[in-house]
Amino acid sequence: MSRPETLQPLFRSLHSIKGVGDKLAALLTRFFGAPEGQEAIVLDILMHMPSGVVDRRRQVGIAEAYMNQVVTLRLHIDRHQPPPRGKPHIPHRVFAHDETGDISLVFFRAQGGWVEKALPVGGERWVSGQIAFFNGEKQITHPDYIVEADKFATLPLVEPVYPLTNGLSSKALAKLVRQAVDSVPALPEWIPAETLSGCKWPPFAEAMRQVHLPDDPDQGQLWSPARQRLAYDEYLAGQITLQLVRSSMVSAHGVARQFSGKLTDKVRSLLPFELTEGQELALDEIRVDLAAPERMSRLLQGDVGSGKTVVALMAMAAMAESGAQSALMAPTELLASQHFRTIQPIAEEAGLGIALLTGKMSAPERRAIRAGLADGTIHIAVGTHALFQSDIEFKDLGLTVVDEQHRFGVHQRLALSDKGRHTDLLVMTATPIPRTLVLTHFGDMAVSVLRQKPKGRQPIDTAVLSIGDYSRVVSRLQARLAEGAQAYWVCPLVEESETLDVVSAEDRFAELRQVFGDQVALVHGRMSAAAKQEVMARFKADEIKLLVATTVIEVGVDVPNATIMIIEHAERFGLAQLHQLRGRVGRGSQRSACLLLFKDPLSETAQARLETIKSTEDGFEIAEKDLELRGQGDLLGTRQSGMPGYRLAVPDVHRHLLEFAHDDAKALMERNPALAGPDGEAARTLLYLFRKDLALPLIRAG
């Protein structure tokens, strides 16, 4: 189905608007970030929300105009005082009055006589701007509007203010906005009538008019009915998209699996610890999913060190009982080989065939593994996305486990699930994601959460210190390393930067080397994978005592003997990152410590972050706080990962509408999965408006 005819006016290029030439069109295309090779369109203007509203309705006498107020005055122009010749820095002043008092209008560098033309002596003009005082006299510097007495109607009394870019004036944008609003067609309504009347929300076209051309400043506020309606629309479009992804993944029929319990019991008996309640619960949820005829699409959230890998291993063992294979996919080779080392001994002893597939294998090794996957003797394949290259054929792939989801958009999920025709999908993430974000990004997945740490894990003592205590920190570290401890020292940058006043990993390594000699090594993101792995292996083998690193160690490096984590310039890291880094210690049986070194002065946000990390180890609490401090764009690295950034909805203000939209989208898809009839037509229109129509081909016919 193609875009509805009614929407065409909104998808016209901005070139088609009167007064937009090539230069302005190119500027707007850049400003609105139109997709590669496409021009900005009328819809881009509509979706560009005002950041505030100026209220010019105060029409008073000069006597009642107060400091810093924006007022609109009807003035009689008395005289001009241009700057003396050769002194252009002195302003041009215009003196005026009304029956209540006097005022001067001030213009800097006003050349070409336009001020005299705009404000002729003896004439009357409406003037609007902000009142200030100078030497006890009232004045307005550079009034926003000067209008002839009989043209009062052209003065915008309630004026939205927009984010602008270099070369785009607010007046030019205001003109475009008016034309864009006028071209919104009558659209079918996708919100149920009872919701509209209950919330007192206007129709879409009217909501756009109220936000962009308000009669009253309240209409433009973030919490106004019009803006709430638009935020809800944006959320709803996103949630319908996720429901479509879900139904296309779930509807492709899965296989109802049967389990004997033989392999899972064997694996359980080989584990060196008991499973936590959370792990048992997650396993039950996964088993129910696997036994059902629909495909599983589940997100397993667990903090660093909560034992997700074990849950995945049990799920893969269950899959093997039902006669099918599993693939465990990690984002990097380092992590893939680490997962492999963790589970291989247990899997093999339980009688499960397991293999690690990486890009570096020799051809004969790769051939042997391909054969094992094709004939089914390998039950579990571990690797990076190389597992899904075209030459790899599984005999019967039943379960795909993906580690570290947030590098993973909706499209990747779809592509992945094509490889195993009917495979179940389990995604593990160590980033505790607050509920609002789970809905936004994974509304198509069921969620299991691991909250407890496995038994025997020690709490981590966290302290915050100024970098001024460097020498104390180093001597304390010497003592601890002499007792046999190992430590990480993390810096934010690899090498010295000219713009940031930050100690780089290379500089810090050089300094620590003078104290610790060969006991210290450096690892950072620009090293080759082999060099990194070699250093990590030496650290793990306890040949190196102190590892200086950038954040490459953030995810998944497992050295139980390392009990000290020092994070330098902790004020430069986000909460989630600090939490991830701290999670690299406290993995063994000894008490661990994390030291956050900061450099003054600290911003309020940085202080709040360090305070949060110091006071709690609960990743979910930390994530909620992070959302509060940073807003959701950064939290998942949204900018890079193609996650939805919102244009109309402001998560802090409109968060409650997300749950609403989630439930409504779900109800709509249950009621009308083919989006047929007038109801479906309206929902499709909504998807086109918010450019989510990529999901439309997923609607199954009938």
Image (tube, rainbow, N blue to C red):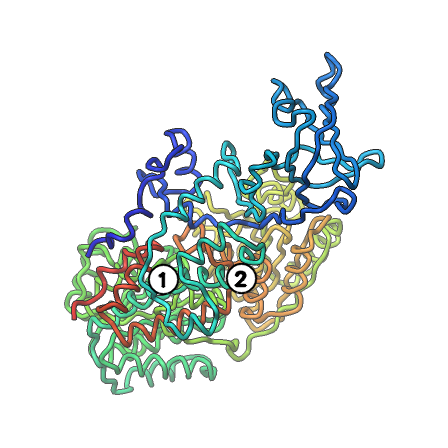
Give the residue at x 56% y 45%: 161
What is the x, y in percent for residue 22?
Answer: 37, 29
The image's mark for residue 421 is none
- Find residue 219 and report its horizontal and vertical position in percent: 54, 57
Residue that appears at 66% across and 22% down:
109
Mark 1 or 2, nearer chain start: 2
**Residue that numbered label 2 is attached to:** 224
Of residues 390 and 413, which is closer to you in this image?
413
Q: Where is residue 530 in the image (x, y as percent from the top left)?
A: 40, 48
Which amino acid type is shown beneath numbered disc 2?
Ser
Quadrant that contains the C terminus: bottom left
Instruction: Name the residue carrying label 1.
Output: 237
- Viewer-proximal residue among 591 and 429: 429
Q: How many marks on residues?
A: 2
Position of residue 659 measured from the top left corner of the image (x, y, whole percent):
45, 71
Q: In this view, does 176 lie to the left or right of 573?
A: left
Residue in front for this viewpoint, 668 or 374: 668
